[in-house]
Amino acid sequence: MYKFFLYSVLIIIYLGLAKTLSPSEIGVQYLQNEKGFSKLVKGPMTTVILVDTHATGFLIKTFYQKYRVILGYDNVEELIVRTSREFAKRNLPNIGLSVYRKFNEKEEFLPLPPGSIYINNSEFGDWKTNKKGEIKWKFKKSFKNFPRFLGWGKFRPDEKFYQDLKTSISLNQTFYGTQNEFGPNGTVTQKNFPHFFKGERKKKVELKTLLFEYFKENF
Amino acid sequence: MAEIFDRLVIRLLLAGFVCLMIYLYRYAHVIFYPTVKRQVLKKIHPSENPADTLHLFSRVVGISIIFSSISFNETTGFFLSLFHFAVWGTIAIVLYLLSLYIIESIVFYNFDYTDEILKRKNMSYAIISFCHALVIAILSRTVMIEAENSIVILLVLWLYMLVIVGFSIKYYTFISKLSFNRLMIQKNMSLCFSYGGFTLGAGFVVASCFDQEHYDITVYCIQVLLKTILSLIIFPIFKKGLVKIFPIKMGDERTLEGHVESDMQSLGYGFFEGCVFISSAILTTMIVNRIQFGTIYPFF
């Protein structure tokens, strides 16, 4: 009994020390849920886009998520956090979407296409008519890199997109674009966040193939 | 051809220099063990006292292990590399003998070298001392390699290593069924095999904890501490597991501890414990050091 007690104490000491002193624990911040963004992300007119998600571990999983933080008037940052299982699972259909926005000290957590806070904001751009006669949103010159940062590629929102976006916000519903351009099934997201959609990350390997590859590599 | 011959000459000269350093060690040994003055400074007669021979030459083995960690860099110049070896060799000798002195003061606090080795020719004492010499040498070598020619880091790591070894040696009384002091007085060989296996095992574990990449000394010390605690958690699992897999029938505990009629049984138990300790320790180093958990790097 005495030995069992000592052994338990040893395990507790190890876990405690590893938690407080391990560099990996100190290096990556923990995000319990979307409410934690306000502590991690500073600056006005900020949008946080979920770029990638990954789970490590065998029995007890640790979930990591990678975000692109676009600080409206400043720069673009990358944020890697550990998250709770529940938040990670909930966020899976939100790849490529903006999951947190902050403007005028107001916070929004509804998943929306990236850059939705900048659309129809005259500080960032204007509605312009292109050669085809379509009215599209165009960022000002000082924000010319935003479509790339936001993962738009060649996509530019039109007025219908903006109206649908406003309707979704009023209904508090996730919006994936007028033609579902964004999100895990969206063509724009798949094209501009290729790392997450890489074939080898998605495919399930059969045991037979796995063993065959193993023997081929090692013998 | 001239270049090859020159390199051979350098190797021969350096070998001679290492012998000179070992000669220096012979006298340094007298400072820490004044009682061996007569044996060390005069001709040694192995047949007269095998225990003393083992005790003395175990340290020669040890110092050779440590010297193997020092490298010659001929590109900096022959004399500078000799000087480097002399400085680090002297530091190694001092730290090694100091470590042995401290560890043996802890382990043999009830025993005296003169009584046990010179008068009683206690082979059990000599073999345990041999194991200490080997373990301290392996650990000092690891610490010297990790210090990467920095004396400050070497001193910090050496003190750290001594603390860990001191605690791990005390762990023996906790996990062994053999009574150290009682069996040592009886010159019981089972003790030296059991304790020898334990010490060597503990040495491998601690050396593996120290053997890791480091960029920052604080983070390195934390990692070593964490690995040491982890080893303390893993080691009993293997020890218990091996005992369960290979169950032994033990006699009465009294007969185990050195009665003349049960010498063979006692010796067998010593072998058993020693082998279990050393195997458990080696397996522990595998679990602690050889599992690659990877990082999130390939994904992010």
Image: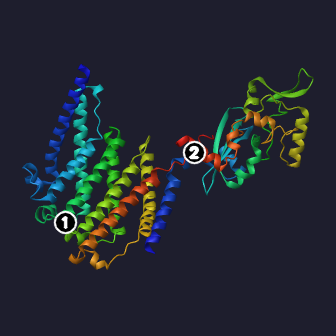
Q: Where is residue B109 in the image (x, y as percent from the top left)?
A: 22, 64
Real-space Cα separation, disc 1 to disc 2, in angstroms: 57 Å
Residue at x 28%, y 27% (from the top left corner)? B74
Q: Which chain carries label 2?
A: A
Q: Where is residue A79 in the image (x, y as percent from the top left)?
A: 65, 41
Badge 1 crowding class, 10 Å Cα cut-off, few under 14, some 14 to 19, many 20 or more, is: some
Residue at x 24%, y 71% (from the top left corner)? B183
Asked where in the image residue B130 lies, by quadrant, the reply is bottom left
Q: Mark 1 lies on which chain?
A: B
Report whether B187 appears left or right of A98: left
Check disc 2 and report its element: helix, strand or loop: helix
The reply to whether residue B125 is visible in this rendering is yes
Report whether B108 appears left or right of A79: left
Q: Where is residue A99 in the image (x, y as percent from the top left)?
A: 75, 44
Report whether B2 appears left or right of B41: right
Badge 2 crowding class, 10 Å Cα cut-off, few under 14, some 14 to 19, many 20 or more, is: few
Residue at x 35%, y 51% (from the top left corner)? B160
Residue under label 2: A214
Asked where in the image residue A72 lies, by quadrant, the reply is top right
Q: Which amino acid does label 2 sit on?
A: Tyr
User: Which mark is on residue B205?
Assistant: none
Q: Which amino acid does label 1 sit on?
A: Phe
Residue under label 1: B111
Q: Nearer the viewer, residue A206 or A192?
A: A206
Q: Is A210 drawn above or below residue A189 in the view shown? A: below
Farthest right residue in view: A133
Q: Is B131 drawn above or below residue A168 in the view shown? A: below
Q: Is A152 drawn above or below residue B170 in the view shown? A: above
